[in-house]
Image: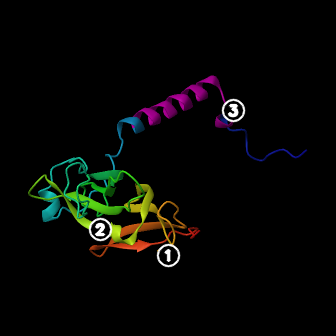
């Protein structure tokens, strides 16, 4: 066995005092790091004229009492499904409502509408029609995720298909892009 040419150094041997000093230093770093935290993260967007006038934390528009562009004659309008979220990134939530005439029989088609509140008035209003009732579609599985509207549309391949039994099923998605809602079909969706 060859001996080291360097004499033994005092710091290569640990003692309880070394462990106490190390533990004190680590405790000091942990305590200091809990005091010196960075500020909370924010994802604020630049304020526009429209968002400056918007009430802070305004609730999503309620579809009850809205005058939908739907002709139901003597029967009332029924909100079948609704979902809310900020679709256009202005900090105010919009409501998506699947609406149809409350017919006593049959399966009336849905209209799918986007509701928002104005900047100067708190009254909600319809700003877009995503599905027109004339298309003879029934909306199911309505959600808002990641600033996009997602839904399943049930429909008919021809006028010969009875209203009770839709034979088409499409998963669809709408996103606000360049001032309009753009419809797409998510991957993995299919028609029955």
Q: Residue 139: image x %, image y %?
A: 42, 60
- Which residue shows up at 44% across the image and 61% down it? 151
Query: Would you place residue 27 above or below residue 166 in this image?
Result: above
Residue under pointer 2: 129
- Asked if residue 46 lies left or right of residue 30, the reply is left
- Mark number displayed over residue 13: 3
Q: Is residue 97 visible?
A: no
Residue 151 appears left or right of 17:
left
How far, Cα to Cα, is label 3 from label 2?
A: 78 Å
Q: Is residue 61 visible?
A: yes
Q: How is the image coloured?
A: rainbow
Residue 98: mark in rendering: none
Q: Residue at x 45, y 32 (%)?
A: 28
Check whether the beta carbons of the residues at disc 3 and disc 2 lie within 8 A of each other.
no
Residue 56 coordinates in the image, percent (x, y): 18, 48
Q: Quadrant of the N terminus?
A: top right
Helix, strand or loop at disc 1? loop
Q: Residues within 10 Å of mark 1 (few under 14, many from 20)?
A: few
Residue identifier under label 1: 158
Pick the front one: 143 or 15: 143
Quarter of the image where one finds residue 11: top right
Residue at image location 73% in from the left, 41% down from the top? 7
Q: Position of residue 38 (x, y in %)?
A: 34, 46
Secondary structure at numbered mark 2:
strand
Mark 1 to mark 3: distance in Å?
A: 88 Å
Decide: is 179 above or below 107: below
Q: Earlier in the sequence, mark 1 or mark 2?
A: 2
Compared across the picture, whether 56 is left or right of 174 comes to: left
Q: Which residues are magenta?
A: 11-32
């Amino acid at each position: 066995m060859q001996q080291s040419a360097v004499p033994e150094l005092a710091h290569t041997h640990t003692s309880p005092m070394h462990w106490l000093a190390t533990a004190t230093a680590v405790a000091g770093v942990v305590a200091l790091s809990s005091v010196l935290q960075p500020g909370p993260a924010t994802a604020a967007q630049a304020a526009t004229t429209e968002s400056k006038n918007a009430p802070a934390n305004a609730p999503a528009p309620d579809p009850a009492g809205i005058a939908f562009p739907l002709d139901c004659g003597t029967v009332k309008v029924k909100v079948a499904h609704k979902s809310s979220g900020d679709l256009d990134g202005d900090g105010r939530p919009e409501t998506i409502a699947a609406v149809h005439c409350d017919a006593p029989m049959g399966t009336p088609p849905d209209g799918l509408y986007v509701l928002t509140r104005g900047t100067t008035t708190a009254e909600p209003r319809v700003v877009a029609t995503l599905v027109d009732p004339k298309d003879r579609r029934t909306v199911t599985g309505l959600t808002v995720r990641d600033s996009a509207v997602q839904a399943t549309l049930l429909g008919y391949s021809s006028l010969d298909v009875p209203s009770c039994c839709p034979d088409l099923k499409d998963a669809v998605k709408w996103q606000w892009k360049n001032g309009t809602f753009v419809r797409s079909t998510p991957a993995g969706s299919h028609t029955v």
